[in-house]
């Protein structure tokens, strides 16, 4: 049995045991994932992996929860296997963590796996031997997480344009020019593949008539950071409608981080 002892100072503001850890894995590798999660749970207070994973897409709420966990985590542990490398959803999670500049720790769950991207191999790739998770690997993993610098802790990772739009949305919200929930429509111009977004629904006339609308890419970026919620409604016409729900977290983020 692998035993874990980490001495912690409960008065320390930046307790490394408080780091939020997310494990990304293929559903075909659930056994080794559960074993690793149990071991990490002994040392860290916040370890999360998708226990419901069955190899199918469970809907927008499921994916929103995955995005929420990626956004909240300090450490993104990616379990590499042939299954994970071939899984569309594992690759989406990995790319999302990479775009958000999360601290990615790749662990190969068996030796000599082929096809690992070069950029992933450069991240001090760790490997689980055929005998399973051993003490040396676990100690190395603990040490890597504990040494995580304070400035690499989780933050909102938004482009400057998204930050500007976050401020604008909160301004409109506070000034009652939009309600907390409103609608936009997305029109895809097939000739040149441009996305056009226009607002309608519960918006003030000043906002509705303005040409200055939040781009769909910005709204998706805010949704990925769990600052807004986007619910898609398909229609029979050439456009699809999104319900945009502004979360209170958006106001807090603007007040604390975006000034």
Image (spheres, rainbow, N blue to C red):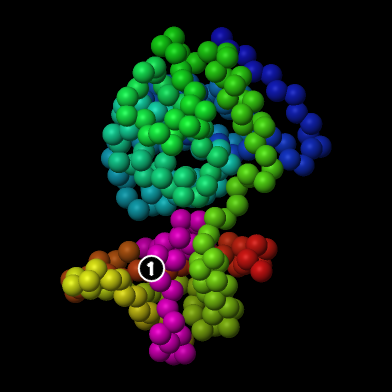
**Can residue 84 be seen from the camera position used here?**
no
Q: Which x, y percent locates residue 81? A: 36, 26
Q: Quadrant of the C terminus?
A: bottom right
**Residue that appears at 67% across and 63% down:** 256
Identity of the residue furthest to the right in this view = 11
Which region shows up in magenta?
205-231
Looking at the image, residue 115 lies above or below residue 179: above
Would you say residue 163 sits in the magenta stretch?
no
Q: Quadrant of residue 41?
A: top right
Q: Quadrant of the N terminus?
A: top right
**Residue that appears at 44% across and 82% down:** 212
Asked if residue 121 lies left or right of residue 241, the reply is right
Looking at the image, residue 71 lies above or below residue 103: below
Would you say residue 217 sits in the magenta stretch?
yes
Q: Which residue is mark 1?
A: 216
**Can residue 183 be seen from the camera position used here?**
yes
**Residue that appears at 41% across and 21% down:** 109
SS for tag 1?
Answer: helix
């Amino acid at each position: 049995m692998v035993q874990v002892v980490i001495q912690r100072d409960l008065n320390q503001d930046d307790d490394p045991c408080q780091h939020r850890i997310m494990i990304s894995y293929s559903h075909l590798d659930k056994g080794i994932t559960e074993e690793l999660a149990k071991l990490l749970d002994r040392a860290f207070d916040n370890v999360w992996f998708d226990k419901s994973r069955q190899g199918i897409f469970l809907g927008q709420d499921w994916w929103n929860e995955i995005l929420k966990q990626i956004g909240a985590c300090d450490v993104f542990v990616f379990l590499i296997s042939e299954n994970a490398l071939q899984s569309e959803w594992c690759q989406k999670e990995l790319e999302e963590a990479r775009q958000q500049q999360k601290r990615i720790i790749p662990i190969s769950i068996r030796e000599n796996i082929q096809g690992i991207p070069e950029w992933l191999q450069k991240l001090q790739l760790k490997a689980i031997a055929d005998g399973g998770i051993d003490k040396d690997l676990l100690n190395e993993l603990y040490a890597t997480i504990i040494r995580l610098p304070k400035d690499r802790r989780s933050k909102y990772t938004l482009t400057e344009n998204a930050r500007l739009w976050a401020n604008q949305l909160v301004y409109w919200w506070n000034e009652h020019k939009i309600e907390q929930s409103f609608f936009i429509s997305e029109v895809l111009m097939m000739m040149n593949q441009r996305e056009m977004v226009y607002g309608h629904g519960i918006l003030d006339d000043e906002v509705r008539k303005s040409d200055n609308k939040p781009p769909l890419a910005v709204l998706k970026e805010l949704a990925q950071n769990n600052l807004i919620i986007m619910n898609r409604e398909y229609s029979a016409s050439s456009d699809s409608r999104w319900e945009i729900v502004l979360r209170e977290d958006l106001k807090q983020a603007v007040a604390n981080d975006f000034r």
